[in-house]
Image (tube, rainbow, N blue to C red):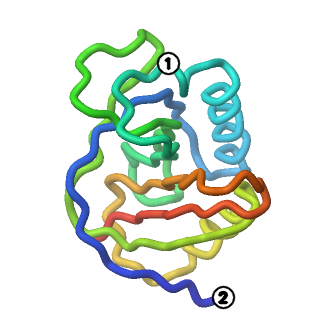
Amino acid sequence: MKMNYEVVQLGEKKVAGIQILTTNENGQAMADIGRVWGKFLQQGIYSSIPDKINSKSIGLYTDYEGDFTKPYNFVACCEIGQTEVLPDSMVMKTIPAGAYAKFIVTGQMQKAVGEFWSNLWSMELSRKYSCDFEEYQNNSEDVNNQEIHIYIALK
């Protein structure tokens, strides 16, 4: 499957949310990430994030200990303004400015995103392994027809 993308330059973004250390080995990330999203959306964390700049949710992959076969942190989060104070259970991360490959996927969120990552791992892409993220556009009430923009940091 050929995946089309465009290279975009992004400015720095600040995000806040909750994180988990995970790995792609043995399907661990699928379970961990699902749990973090569940907590983020169902326990009021999304609504308690101060100074959100829009209604989009972000799934951030960061603090890579190597390539995609090594552990990394996943953060369910939102982009924020200049807030200094966060609830205790939250972390703040900075998505660095730079070049990113931007992919647009549509469909049922978990299925579309899962297929995207499986395909990405077999692509020849000069990845930086700094910060990669999924930006959920939240532009449809239909859970089977969501638009997700996925940004992969490039060297």
Residue 152 as seen in the image, left or right of residue 137 = left
Disc 2 designates what residue? 1
Amino acid at dot 2? Met
Residue 92 x, y percent position in the rendering: 33, 28
**Discs 2/1, front:** 1
Q: Is residue 62 above or below residue 102?
A: above
Residue at figure coordinates x 59%, y 51% from the top left: 138
Disc 1 designates what residue? 48
The C terminus - image quarter: bottom left
Residue at figure coordinates x 49%, y 63% from the top left: 150
Residue 137 x, y percent position in the rendering: 54, 55
Q: Residue 142 lies in what quarter of the image?
A: bottom right
Residue 100 as seen in the image, left or right of residue 152 = left
Marks 2 and 1 close (CB-CB < 8 Å)? no
Residue 107 x, y percent position in the rendering: 72, 66
Residue 64 x, y percent position in the rendering: 40, 48
Q: Is residue 143 above or below residue 4?
A: above
Real-space CA distance between mark 2 and mark 1, rounded to the nearest whole angstrom: 39 Å
Q: Residue furthest top?
A: 88
User: Dot 2: few (<14), some (14–19), or many (≥20) neighbours within 10 Å?
Assistant: few
The N terminus - image quarter: bottom right
User: Dot 1: few (<14), some (14–19), or many (≥20) neighbours within 10 Å?
Assistant: some
